[in-house]
Amino acid sequence: MKNPKKLILTAVMSAGLVAGGVAAGAPAANAATSCPTNYLCLYSGTNQTGTMLFMGNGSSMNNSGGYFQSSYLAGGSAVRSSVNNTLGRFCTYSASLVKTNILAAQTGGNLASTNVRYVKIC
């Protein structure tokens, strides 16, 4: 007769391997479009999910020095996360041009303030 403790341990280990394999290979649900190299991207959802509300070329924005927006930002869509794949630091601004977030180079994450209407090098 087989050892029952050994059978239970084998079953638990097998279930863990199968579950781990499935989780590791599963695609992210509702993943937003990824942000290309040298672009700054803003998203409607946390953790870079939802709709991409803004995608700006870092070189063009850096050389211009002006305020940038998209139709989403102009329409008042809440921005919840960002990816800055540029080498520059950008800031977000409210409609009255009050600085609301600082986006360091080569970083991404959830924003402290969702009040974003403009983006500018800072």
Image (spheres, rainbow, N blue to C red):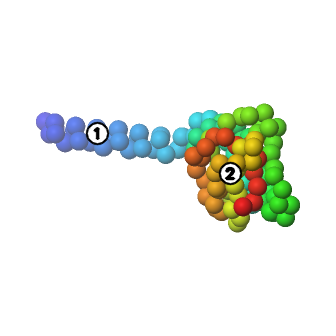
- Across and down, in percent, residue 45 comes to 62, 38
Left or right, 92 with respect to 9, comes to right
Q: At numbered mark 2, what does the secondary structure look like: helix, strand or loop? A: strand
Residue 56, x across and y down, in percent: 79, 52
- Residue drawn at (59%, 46%), measured in percent from left and top? 111
Q: Quadrant of residue 113?
A: top right
User: Hey, which quadrant is residue 80 in on the image?
Assistant: top right
- Is residue 23 in sight in this rendering? yes
Q: Nearer the viewer, residue 1 or 122?
A: 122
Q: Earlier in the sequence, mark 1 or mark 2?
A: 1
Amino acid under label 1?
Val
Q: Nearer the viewer, mark 1 or mark 2?
A: 2
Image quarter hosting the C terminus: bottom right
Q: Residue 52 falls in which quadrant of the image?
A: top right
Residue at 42% in and 44% down: 20
- Left or right of 15 on screen, residue 46: right
Query: Residue 121 location in percent, x, y?
Result: 75, 60
Which residue is more in the foreground, 32 or 68?
A: 68
Name the residue type under label 2.
Lys
Residue lying at 64% horizontally and 55% vertically, measured from the top left = 102
Question: Closer to the camera, 89 or 27?
Answer: 89
Is 38 placed above or below 13 here? below
* Mark 1, secondary structure of its residue: helix
* Quarter of the N terminus within the rendering: top left
Which residue lies under the disc numbered 1? 12
User: Distance of mark 1 from mark 2, alpha carbons?
Assistant: 53 Å
Residue hosting label 2: 99
Q: At x 41% / y 39%, what residue is drawn?
A: 19
Asked if the residues shown at circle 1 and circle 2 are in contact, with their CB atoms under 8 angstroms apart, the answer is no
Viewer-proximal residue among 26 and 109: 109
Q: How many discs mark residues in the rendered view?
A: 2
